[in-house]
Amino acid sequence: ALLPMASVSIHRVNLLSGIMKRSLKCHSHCLDNRSVRRLSNFTGSGLVPMVIEREGRGGERAFDIFSRLLRERVIFVGGEINDADANLIVAQLLYLEAESADPIEMQYVRSPVHTICIGQACSMGSILLGAGAKGFRKALPNSTIMIHQPSGGSSGQASDMAIRANEILRLKKRLIDIYAQHCGREEESQTDRCNRFEQALERDKFMDGESAKAFGIIDHVVASRSSKLNDS
C-alpha cells in the first residue's frame, strides 16, 4: 500500500508553519500535545512527519503520517509490543473492519490481514507476522525474524515462585500451539509442527527473509521494488 506522492508535502511537528496551523485548526483531526508526544515516542525521535493534502478551492487537510497510513488501511507497528501499543493496534483493526472488509495492511477480524516485516519482527512481533493471512505474509530479504520461548523472573515465597514458573511453562506451550497453527507446513502433522517449534524455541532463533519463508513464518520475500507489497 504505497502512498501516492502527487500533491502531498511532508512537514514536521516542531516546524509547523502558519499554513499548517491553519490546516490543523480547520481540520477535525487535530493533534493535541498528548497526541504529538505519543507519536514522537512511537517514532523514537521528537519529529513526526505531517502530510498536507490539497483540496479544491485552495483548501488543505493535515494528517500525522500514521493517520495518513491508516486511511490507506496500513497499520504501522514499531518498537516493543506493550499494553498501550496492543490497544492501539486492536482499535485500528476494529475501526478498519467496521469501515470495510477490504484487506488490512487477526483472529477476530473478518478482513484478511496482510503482514509485512520491513526491519525486525522479534518475539511477539514474529507472532504478529506469522498470524497474518496465509499467502500474504511477507518480509524484505534482509529483515530479521526471531522466535524464542517466554522468559521471566520471580521473587518471594517458594510456592509463589513455583506458580510463576508453571505460568511461564503454560505460556510456552500456548506459544508453540499458536506457531504450529499459523506457521506449520502443509505436509506436517500437528504433532510434528509442535515438536519442530518446541525445539526451535529452546534458544533465540534468528532468521532472514528466506529462512523465515522456509520455516513457515512468511510466504513471500519482497526482493525488489518490482515485487509489489500487495502482490500475492
Image: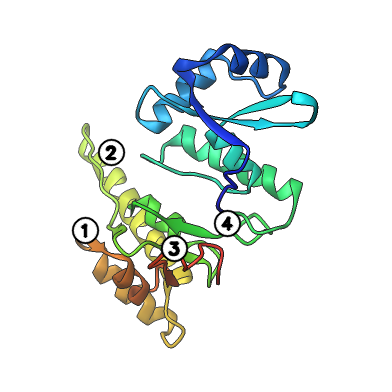
The answer to which image quadrant residue 184 occupies is bottom left
Q: Can you give x and y, in whole percent of width and height, for residue 229 in the image?
A: 51, 62
Q: Residue at x 23, y 37 (%)?
A: 154
Provide the residue designation for mark 2: 160
Q: Can you give x and y, in whole percent of width and height, for residue 138 in the image?
A: 45, 64
Q: Nearer the viewer, residue 105 or 109?
A: 105
Q: Nearer the viewer, residue 120 or 107?
A: 120
Provide the residue designation for mark 1: 204
The answer to which image quadrant residue 157 occupies is top left
Q: Can you give x and y, in whole percent of width and height, for residue 9 in the image?
A: 55, 32
Side of 103 relative to 210 (left or right): right
Q: Cβ–Cβ below 8 Å for labels 2 and 3? A: no
Among the two numbered marks 2 and 3 on one chain, the one whose residue lies closer to the N terminus: 2
Provide the residue designation for mark 4: 106
Q: Quadrant of the C terminus?
A: bottom right
Q: CA distance from mark 1 to mark 3?
A: 31 Å
Of all residues, the one furthest to the bottom in this rendering is: 187
Secondary structure under tag 3 reads loop
Side of 207 relative to 131 (left or right): left
